[in-house]
Image: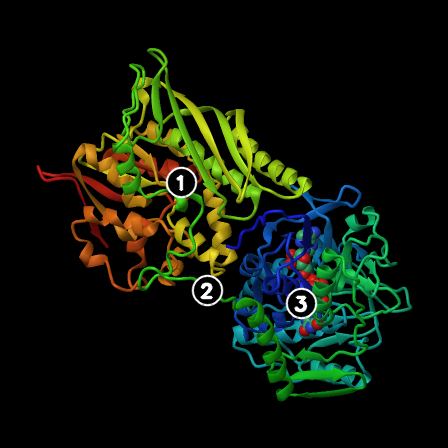
Amino acid sequence: MKNPFPTLAAQTLVLLGGGHSHLAVLMQLAKQPVPGLDIVLVTRDVETPYSGALPAWINGDCATDDLLIDLRPLAQMAGARLIRATVEKMDLQNRTLHCAGRPAIGFDILSINIGSWPDVAAIPGAEQFAIPVKPIPEFLKHWESIQQEVDSAVSEQRPYTITIIGGGPASVELACAMQMRLYRNAGLPLPDRLGQESFIRIVLMTNGSVLLSALNPGAQARALCTLRSRGIDVRLQHSVRSVEQNAVLWETTGTSTVESLQTDRILVATGASAPDWLQHTGLTLDAGGFILVNNHLQSVSHANVFATGDIASIENCPRPRSGVYAVRQGMPLARNLRRFATGIPLQSYNPQAHVLALLNLGDGTAIAARGNWSLQGRWAGVWKKWIDQRFVEKYSRIPAPVERSFSAGSRSSSLRCAGCGAKVGSTMLHDVLAQLHPCTHPDILSAHMSTEDAAMIRIDERRTLLQTVDHFRAFINDPYLFARIATVHCLSDIHAMGATAHSALAIVSVPHAAPRIMQSMLLEIMSGCTEVLNAHNTALIGGHSSEAQELSFGLSVNGFVEPDRILTKRGMQPGDVLILCKPLGTGTLFAADMRYQAKQRWIENALTHMQHSNQMASHCFVRHGANACTDITGFGLLGHLSEMLTPDAVRVVLSLNALPILDGALECVAGGYLSSLQEDNARHAALLTNAEQFHPKQLNKQPLYHLLFDPQTAGGLLASVPARNAAACLADLHAAGYRNAASIGEVLSTGGESAAVGLRE
Ligand SMILES: Cc1cc2nc3c(=O)[nH]c(=O)nc-3n(C[C@H](O)[C@H](O)[C@H](O)COP(=O)(O)OP(=O)(O)OC[C@H]3O[C@@H](n4cnc5c(N)ncnc54)[C@H](O)[C@@H]3O)c2cc1C
């Protein structure tokens, strides 16, 4: 990960929306960073759909990875902070964006590329009974259920009608793609004329007298002829008045007799609309509510605000809202954002009057239209597919940064991990501590070399004070989320000992930057921390803050527990079952993320697990009589298990296939992305009695084995639970939301031998 918090950041550029233009902006900022520019990408969808490929995806001709562009690697490469959130309000005076559930996001320069939506509000009933085709991620979910409904209708020999409202390119392409897919799913031949009896009926309704009014008459005629020849019921001059459950109420354009069409599903692909909240921003908008920009793509009312794509209207230069224009505006936008940030005069951009339109007809052919000409054929279909694939590939295949590799076969070292992957290795720590001779006091219950999760100080007969401290560098570039996870992590030592957290002191280092940027980062961190502490009824009672090269954060946490209820690492009993409450894999996932190779969906899932506190798991383990417990953090599963083994001299058999694993972790290990702490953690392999059976030379042969040594940030609790309670304990953990909690092994007697761990499949 590039340093996401460049020192001396002087201004913040917020890219709002992961639309087509911002792809080029991120790419350009990665290729040529602007010194002192702190970049933030705020977007509702991180896997942003490339609309040009949507018909091919519906039709089944294109994989999901060729439809969705993952913005995460791109943002990582550009050194941009990625915030997945929906902006609901904008305060241009105070230069802040507001999203539900997180602190305001400050900016100096704002670039808006949030797309548009079919104007659903213009059709009474549509918000309740119809499906808009945008936002596309929402539409994709509906498409799954539509297919299931059609499948059951066909199997019951019941007709099924889909009505698409709209007569533009999106409606035409959707009608063709859906028809092809649904007929193929059902194993039915396509109808070859309108009116032919069929179970699956597609109706396209538009108030215009032609289809594709923005294209030339040749293209319009080709589309109409193709759709009708395939039995798609195109209804021109049908003005939709309203929709109801399973009915479209329409009248012939210019008349007032309302008629009704019964239908199973209604899709809306009508003209674009902009979000209402833009009306309250003070930005100058056009009559349709879109942001009015000059030919620098700069708001006509606010010089520090830029807008492109569907959401923008260029003054005195009307153009249709299409992805082609949004794509073309990417490079001029990137240039002007750079110029604006560095005080250089902006460059003019004049959009082409005509662009090439390629309409996918779903059968491998396409209509090509530009200006006054149009053609149709298979070659146009191949051309469109090639253009679309090239576009998605350009932004999806992000090369890993060049780095030195210190160990053969892995890319584990020259980029140092953050989070708990930045812990000092256990061997080094042990060696250093062994050379120290700190004084002690009678009320200190934990020895100097204790490996317990927290230090123990006796307060009185009924109370023991637990104290712990954790502190690490940011491993993600969202300060708010980082602080939430770091807080969960810091509290975990207290939870591992079956105690209740009481209060905490914070240690925070913020990169030196312009005062407004530092203040906003500090606010985000402390808001994230306080929210989590409050949810644990734990008071923030003080701390220390400083300037530094990098963002880091930690807490010293105090907790209390009754002396006879302390859960320690000691105490595993033969016959116990080992239960791990959270999945493994954060080390490898974030090692891959640093190299721009992790998918957003993997990281997002990992971040969700990492925010899950161990508090409830702790209660659960105490309730079910756990004999020993620890939390899995920097030293990995085997490293922390070794700390439980040493005093008790028991044998453990771990079931590799039972280990709960985070999505994507196996792929990341197999790809050779290992944490920089992995090598040190792997020394614990000495404990394994049969490592040779499972330790292959190539990482991709047995990735599970390597996850034994993967350092975890905010990892789960590992507890040794009496076998008789194990099933109930697991059921309780699942009910408490630890859905991946699993029994991962058994504790056995050593029979006099030394402590050891055996592996089985
Ligand atoms: C079925 C279909 C097929 C199409 N086919 C084509 C085609 O072949 N060629 C073509 O040129 N055009 C096509 N279009 C039109 C095309 O979809 C749009 O013109 C294009 O997507 C607009 O791009 P954009 O960059 O403005 O925004 P979008 O691509 O829509 O991206 C907007 C981004 O902003 C984010 N966002 C939105 N609101 C917020 C918010 N409040 N806070 C944070 N983030 C937000 C979204 O998550 C998204 O990442 C098609 C449209 C449809 C529906």
- Give the quarter of the figure containing the C terminus: bottom left
Residue 418 in view in this figure: yes
Which residue was labeled with disc 2?
402
Q: Are marks 2 and 1 in contact (CB under 8 Å)?
A: no
Residue type indicated by callout 2: Val
Residue type indicated by callout 3: Ile
Q: Nearer the viewer, residue 513 or 571?
A: 513
Sequence-first tag of 3 and 1 = 3
- Give the structural element (helix, strand or loop) at label 3: strand
**Neighbours of disc 2 within 10 Å: few (<14), some (14-19), many (20+):** few
The scheme the figure's colours follow is rainbow
> Residue at (59%, 68%) from the top-left corner?
158
Which residue was labeled with disc 1?
734
- Give the structural element (helix, strand or loop) at label 1: helix
Q: Quadrant of ligand 1?
A: bottom right
Q: Quadrant of residue 56?
A: bottom right
Q: Position of residue 12 (x, y in %)?
A: 68, 49
Q: Is residue 626 left or right of residue 318?
A: left
Q: Nearer the viewer, residue 521 or 385?
A: 521
Q: Nearer the viewer, residue 747 or 255?
A: 747
Count of numbered labels shown in the rendering: 3
Q: Are marks 2 and 3 in contact (CB under 8 Å)?
A: no
Q: Position of residue 303 (x, y in %)?
A: 81, 54
Q: Quadrant of residue 650?
A: top left
Which residue was labeled with disc 3?
162
Question: Which residue lies most toward the left here?
Answer: 752
Task: Report whether the residue tagged 1 is closer than 8 Å to ligand 1.
Answer: no
- Give the structural element (helix, strand or loop) at label 2: loop
